């Protein structure tokens, strides 16, 4: 599995997500620009001592990332998605793509991939879940569907 964070803004969220990737063996992709330095103490503290276990790839832009993943199965997560994340049969090499905390993925990107836009069900009138929580919810569902490969 691959987790993709497009222009993440909050170091603690990225650190928590990196830790989740470390414990699940999931690859992490960070798409620039980042809203923090990768030397940020909050980022490092949130990831604890798991950083050496995280396989991270950096992409200089969303366009570069999309070119890098041409032909791969991409799933875009947004409150604007029409289908629930539980309606998909996830595969081992899928890319789970999440946008910046304050604005989400760009509307034109979601419009370009309407059948690949998914959402986590929430009560009406609530803006969104925390990014780190959203990643964990979706990733663990994807891994559950696959029988938690490599996990004990």
Image: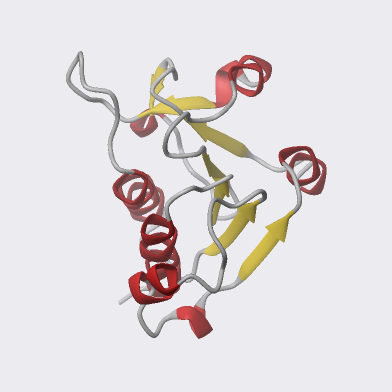
Image position of 132 (left or right of 39): left
Q: Residue 69's spot in the image, x, y percent?
A: 75, 46
Image position of 41 (left or right of 128): right
Q: Residue 39's spot in the image, x, y percent?
A: 54, 74
Residue at the image position 38 percent from the left and 32 percent from the top: 85
Q: Residue 66's spot in the image, x, y percent?
A: 75, 40
Q: Is residue 5 above or below residue 27?
A: above
Residue at the image position 64 percent from the left and 40 percent from the top: 73
Total numbered circles: 0
Give 99 or 55, whichever is nearer the viewer: 99
Q: How is the image coloured?
A: secondary structure
Q: Name the quadrant of the N terminus.
A: bottom right
* The furthest residue to the left: 123
Residue at the image position 67 percent from the left and 50 percent from the top: 32
Give 48 or 143, whichever is nearer the viewer: 48
Give 34 or 25, whichever is nearer the viewer: 34
Q: Name the quadrant of the C terminus.
A: bottom left
Residue 64 appears in the picture as rendered: yes
Q: Is residue 36 above or below residue 142?
A: below
Q: Residue 148's spot in the image, x, y percent?
A: 37, 63
Residue 150 appears in the picture as rendered: no
């Amino acid at each position: 599995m691959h987790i993709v964070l497009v222009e993440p803004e909050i170091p603690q969220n990225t650190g928590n997500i990196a830790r989740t990737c470390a414990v699940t063996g999931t690859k992490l992709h960070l798409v620039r620009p980042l809203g923090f330095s990768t030397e940020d103490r909050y980022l490092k503290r949130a990831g604890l001592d798991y950083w050496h276990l995280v396989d991270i790839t950096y992409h200089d832009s969303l366009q570069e990332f999309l070119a890098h993943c041409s032909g791969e199965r991409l799933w875009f997560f947004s409150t604007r998605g029409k289908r629930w994340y539980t309606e998909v049969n996830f595969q081992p090499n899928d890319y789970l793509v999440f946008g910046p905390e304050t604005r989400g993925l760009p509307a034109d990107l979601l419009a370009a991939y309407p059948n690949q836009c998914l959402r986590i069900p929430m009560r009406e009138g609530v803006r969104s879940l925390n990014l780190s929580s959203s990643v964990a919810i979706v990733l663990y569902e994807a891994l559950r569907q696959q029988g938690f490969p490599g996990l004990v």
